[in-house]
Structure formats: structure tokens, C-alpha cells
Amino acid sequence: MAIEELKILTALLPELKPDASVPVGPGDDCAVLKFPGASGVELLAAVDQLARDVHYTSDTPPELAGAKLLKRNLSDIAAMGGAPRWALLTVAAGGRDAEWVLRFCRGVAACAEEYGVVLTGGDLAGLCADTEVATLTILGEVPAGKAVLRSGARPGDAVYVTGEIGNSFASRHHLAFAPRLAEGRFLRGRARAMLDVSDGVLLDARRMARASEVDIKIDASRIPLRAGAALPGALSDGEDYELLFAAPDGLENMWPEELAKLTRIGEVLPGSGRIVDRDGNEYPARRSGYEH
Amino acid sequence: MAIEELKILTALLPELKPDASVPVGPGDDCAVLKFPGASGVELLAAVDQLARDVHYTSDTPPELAGAKLLKRNLSDIAAMGGAPRWALLTVAAGGRDAEWVLRFCRGVAACAEEYGVVLTGGDLAGLCADTEVATLTILGEVPAGKAVLRSGARPGDAVYVTGEIGNSFASRHHLAFAPRLAEGRFLRGRARAMLDVSDGVLLDARRMARASEVDIKIDASRIPLRAGAALPGALSDGEDYELLFAAPDGLENMWPEELAKLTRIGEVLPGSGRIVDRDGNEYPARRSGYEH
């Protein structure tokens, strides 16, 4: 039931007017907003959805689904190098009882407490269909001008990924993952471009390459595979929620060992948004990732 | 397909911990947030949902449905005495083509431009059912400590409502209304308690009475009825999106004539959350409004 997100956004986004209060608008992991009267700190804002049979199945424990919704958003804050502060939650549900919805909300609330996020509001609604969809809006902060965008990669930078990639569904990593907030904060001021891997390394690397107007070479043999994962699927299955970033070569030498495993998987080349393998052959632009 | 919102919230809200960064949390029209480094200004945040067959019908022009979603949120900002700044949008849709979703989003975007709101992000998703639900998160600002809450009504205050009440669906007011932003700003520092009338005058007055720990007397004969509206339904049909507020008696004498019509409809009495008619008889607590 795809709704042709790309087609809609391609039509809509150019119609939106830029505004001085929004240094970073739609198209990055979070928007960056200049709050009046605040100097030295900028507001981060992002929203994400979680729908049954897309992001979890009917028999997923609702607490885990709720926590996943918040962690997806925390991963977006991490990818900007920011810190999360507040969240707003909505649930629209049909064909579920109040107990399911309450357990879902408690999953969000428990996860919020774990990560120091304050749940400040929300809305619950009925839906005239046997399904449900929830949204979470995350608000956070980042030192002014220091958010790590997708657009700063430069030829010669190394490309890194945290943690492991692939087999997220079968391993239940897509429910159990920890958002890479500490890694994101460490990378603020160190990474030149960053995003979180939600739709597969290849598709997300392409987003960085296009935003940065460079090519990116990915050496698939270096991809740190999760147990049970195999190439080439691991590059496009998605739901990894790891950080993919470009930084000056040698970052691995200063990487704190208490953080998630770091792997250098490629490099930034002059170019125009292509992803190439270690032999320089282009990965096809289509079917290289799943848009969740 | 109600999901027993009240039952869920009654269980969930006491479990949420208060936080010094959130002077006003769940339960008012917007949350009030203290943004780090910002002095003199507080952040307002609210989220609302719009679902097919609940807030509009299948044949409602999508542009009007989109604008309604934003205006519902602007009405929440108005009810705090605030000014809107930014919005984030989500749409989850099944059984609609990309054209419908694009027209819906354009309705939001055009309305945002009209009200000086910057659309800064969002998310589009498919839904495995023939329905759709959209959410909008509104972010705004209010001078620090000046947000008008539901809880400030005092015995002796007069109770007022802006505009007209009732017959919102048949008249299409529920799509055509203008959020009372100018009225809300004028009332900042003047109204002691305020909310917007989304679920009917009686239910929303009861919310104010409970939050303020007072009784409120409503003189139904004074309710300014919209053409085609009739009592008692007009008091409970909802979707009026007018401001209901308590203020010191005599506010009508300083009301700027360029603002929406103002009508005094009652007064605040000592009490504990009851709504009474002009003879002092209590309106029943159930079935006095529709929770949208």
C-alpha cells in the first residue's frame, strides 16, 4: 500500500518556502529550528510513524512496538549529534482494545524515562478500520550551528558505520536496538556528514552522496554483518538504526572503546550522488533499499 | 471504534513523571516547555490527529481536510494565548492515490503560509487498510509564564465565548472556521482560564471547571447560535473551534471591535467541577459532549 512517498515529496517540497527560523528544513533526519531568545542552542524536531504490518506485526508485544517508535526518533536525534528532550505521541487504532493501546503507550513512556525524554502530550483516536498507526514527535537540542547534516561529506573523507548491519527482522534487532545517542554526540564536531541507517546502507549512503554532491565508494566486504545476515541483502534490508557517517580519515584511532563498534566501510569520491563498489562499478539506483 | 481515550489516559497520565522543563504537561491545549538558553519566551507544543469518517468524510476535498488539520492545532495555540511558528505533518494512507495525499499536503501547506507557519518536516507512510489518518504537530511561542491555562478561573469571573456555536457539520463551519489567534493573543494577560471549544461547550466548560476546581454556570439562553443550530444539541455537538474563557466581569467593554463577536454566557461559582444551568441545576456529566 505504498503511497509513492518520493513522488509526493518531489512535488511538494519545492513548493515550501524557506524561512530564516529554519536553518535545516525537510530532508535531513531532523529539522533545525532557531527558537526566539535562545542563543547558543538550536531546537531539533522530527516526527516518525509506526504502522501495524509495516513496522511490527500483529503479535508484536505492544510495549516493544511503542519503545521502537520512540527509539526510531531517538536515532534521528543521534544522527544530528543532538540530545533528546521532549516527545508527543499519537495513536489511532481500530480493532484493538484499550488494554493494547495502554500497553503500547506504557512502552513509549518506559522507554522515554530510560532515555531522559519527557512525554509532554499526545492524542488518542479511534480509526474506522482494523489497523493502527502511531506517531511520535521528538524535540531535542543541539549547540547552535553544530548539527551534523547529510550534506557535509567531502572527497577524501572516510565512510564509517557503527554496530552491525543486516538481518534486523529475524534477529529482532529492529525491536531491540539501542539508538546511538552517545556515538552521535561524540561525532558532533568530528563527522562531516551523518544519517541513521533506516532504509539500508546503500539507499542511505545514496542520500548522503546526493545531499553532499559527491560519490561514495562502499566496500561490501568490509560491512560488519550481524549474525545470520548475508550480502547483498544486508545492504538493502534496512531497519539497522546504526549511524553512517563521513569523517576525516583516521577517526577510528580516537574512537572511545565504550562506544559501539566502528567499521570503516568506504570513502568519499568526487562525483554527483552515485554509490560505487570497490571496483568502481555503480550500484543500481533502484531497489537498493526499502523505504519504511 | 472508540478506544476509550479517557480510560487509557486515566491510567497512563499519573504514571508520567513531572519535569522542571515542562511547566504545563499533558491536559491543557498545548504543553509549555522551557527551552534551554531561552529567557522570556516559552515553547508551546501540541499534536492533533485527523481521521477519515471521524473528522471529515470520504468526499471532503482533501485540501479542506488538510487545512482543517492545521487549523485545529492553531486553535490550540490560540487557546494558550500563543503564536504559532512551525509544524510537522504525517499522513498514513491506504486506498488513496498519490494525488489525494499530495492535495491534502498542499492544503496544509497553503494554510500554513496563510498563518505564517513554516512546515519543517513530516513523514508519509502506507497503511494496510482502506482509510487514512494524518497528524500535525504545532510548535509555537508564548511569553514566559504568560500562557493562559485551563486552571485559572475564579469564583466571580464571567464566562465568555467567541463567535457562534452549533450546527458545525451541516454548515461546514468545521472545515471553514478561522482559528481565533488574534482573540487568543488579546486575551493573554486578560483571561484567567481559556480553552478552545472542540468537543462542545458543556464538555469543554466542564474541563475548565475541573482544572480550576470551580463550578461554572452556563445560561443556555445566551449561547450565540449559528444559523441552523438549536439547543440543546448546540451545547454538545462540538467542532466549534471558538474560545471559551473566564475573565473578570466587564471584559466586553474593552473588547476590540475588529475581533470576533464576544458573548457572555455564564459565570464562575465556588464548587468542584460541576456545570449548572441558570437555575442552578447540574448538567449531567455524561453525554454532554462528543470527544473527537
Image: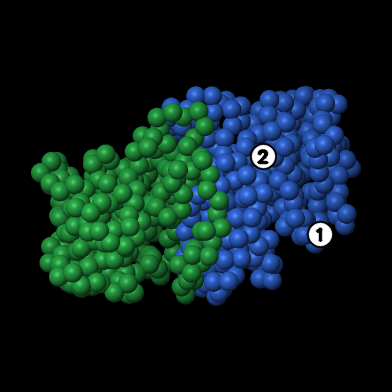
Chain colours: A blue, B green
Mark 1, Cα crowd under 10 Å, few <14 / some 14-19 / many 20+, is: some
Q: Nearer the viewer, residue B49 or B57?
A: B49
Chain under disc 1: A
Mark 2, Cα crowd under 10 Å, few <14 / some 14-19 / many 20+, is: many
> Label 1 belongs to which residue?
A171
Q: Residue at x 72, y 31 (%)?
A: A186
Q: Nearer the viewer, residue B151 or B137?
A: B151
Q: Amino acid at mark 2?
A: Ala
> Label 2 belongs to which residue?
A78
Q: Residue at x 56, y 73 (%)?
A: A96
- The residue tagged with tag 2: helix, strand or loop? helix
Q: Amino acid at mark 1?
A: Ser
Query: Does any portion of residue B93 appear in the rendered image?
Result: no
Against B6, is A248 above or below?
above
Q: Which mark is residue B36?
A: none
For marks 1 and 2 on the same chain, the one whose residue lies earlier in the sequence: 2
- Residue A42 lies, in percent from the top left, at 53, 31
Quadrant in the picture for the C terminus of chain A: bottom right
Q: Nearer the viewer, residue A269 or B78?
A: B78
Q: Residue at x 75, y 55 (%)?
A: A176
Q: Residue at x 22, y 57 (%)?
A: B268
